[in-house]
Image: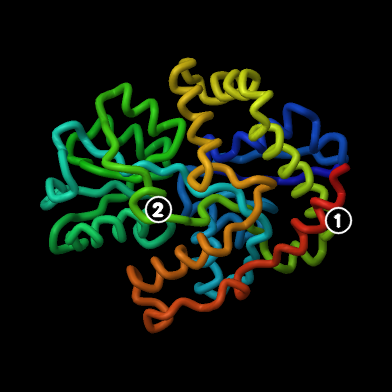
Amino acid sequence: MQPLRVNIFNTSSNLPLLAAQEAGCFARRGLALEIQHTPNSDTQRAGLAAGSFDIAHAAVDNAVAMAEAGQDVLIVLGGDAGMNEFMVRPEIQTMADLRGKVLAVDAPNTAYALVAKKILKNHGLLEGRDYTVRLAGGTGPRAAAMVADPQLAAAMINPPFSFTVRQQGLKSLGSQFALLGPYQATGAFVMRDWARAHVELLQDYLAACIEGQRLVMNPARRTPMIDLLVRSFKLDPVAAAGTYEALLTPGAGLAPDARFNTEGFRAVLAIRAEMEGMWGGTPPAPAKYIDLSYAEHAIQKIS
């Protein structure tokens, strides 16, 4: 068996990975996964660049941040649109109520933090002038921090935590998809040199991931997938069922065959250009950051 080190956030975006592993999709291809959970995106980006693991799954804006920092990283697969909800404390009724409050984020200048800042900007609120930002870790730790600390008034939270925090009193002011439209969220990315040196290995891995995506998105497998959510994330059946429905929501959830959403990625780049002032405010072409040929060959490997 070929060992393969994969680094992920502990969220439901990775249900296809877990489903593929349980169904033996990786083992059939001779792959033995070592799955690592990252506490935050800074740690994950640094680990990938240092060679601490081979493949990362996270919001692909993290790959953009790495590339702009001079690290030769490559996005090789899509996954989902994030399923994020703009979660707030119970006393918050509107976006305007967040004036003078604290936004909880993972890293301050990537992915869902930029999404939250863009949503707030669209509602007339600017960081520093109208609200402040505090680091609170990846989605799981961030959700827990929001519940525990009444000073953390808002955060982008995705399933299953967007359901479990509801059970603890938080609420949503809207989904990311409804508030901003298409967005390429979770995807797989690797260092370019590693991909070139492990073409067949990467293709086999992506083929198994795509098989996992098909397993999760097959309505006939709803019951075993909800059971897998219950077991993997220690959820009650209600939160697990809500999470599964969120994963299958067209446009906002999982993408068929984990296909990369180029329109959604253009939105990623546009938000980064606007909120971080990069590239003189004009985002570059997506091709700079992606190579989908590995995924295309992976699909051909699936019988």
Give the distance between the C-alpha atoms of the residues marked 1 and 2, in whole angstroms: 32 Å
Is residue 144 or residue 228 the one in the foreground? 228
- Residue 148 picture location, percent across and down: 26, 30
Report helix, strand or loop for mark 1. helix
The three-letter amino acid code for the residue at tag 2 is: Tyr
Q: Residue at x 43, y 39 (%)?
A: 158
Residue 64: percent from left, percent from top: 52, 67
Q: In the picture, which quadrant includes the N terminus?
A: top right
Where is residue 210? Give x, y as percent.
72, 44
Contact (CB < 8 A) between labels 1 and 2? no
Within 10 Å of disc 1 (Cα), the crowding (few <14, some 14-19, many 20+) is some
Q: Residues within 10 Å of mark 2 (few under 14, many from 20)?
A: many
Task: In this rendered view, identify the residue nearer to me: 28 or 281.
Answer: 281
Q: Which mark is residue 200?
A: 1
- The residue positioned 49% from the left and 16% from the top of the image is 237
- Displayed quadrant of residue 231: top right
Which residue in the structure is indicated by mark 2?
A: 112
Is 97 on the left or on the right of 29, as rendered?
left
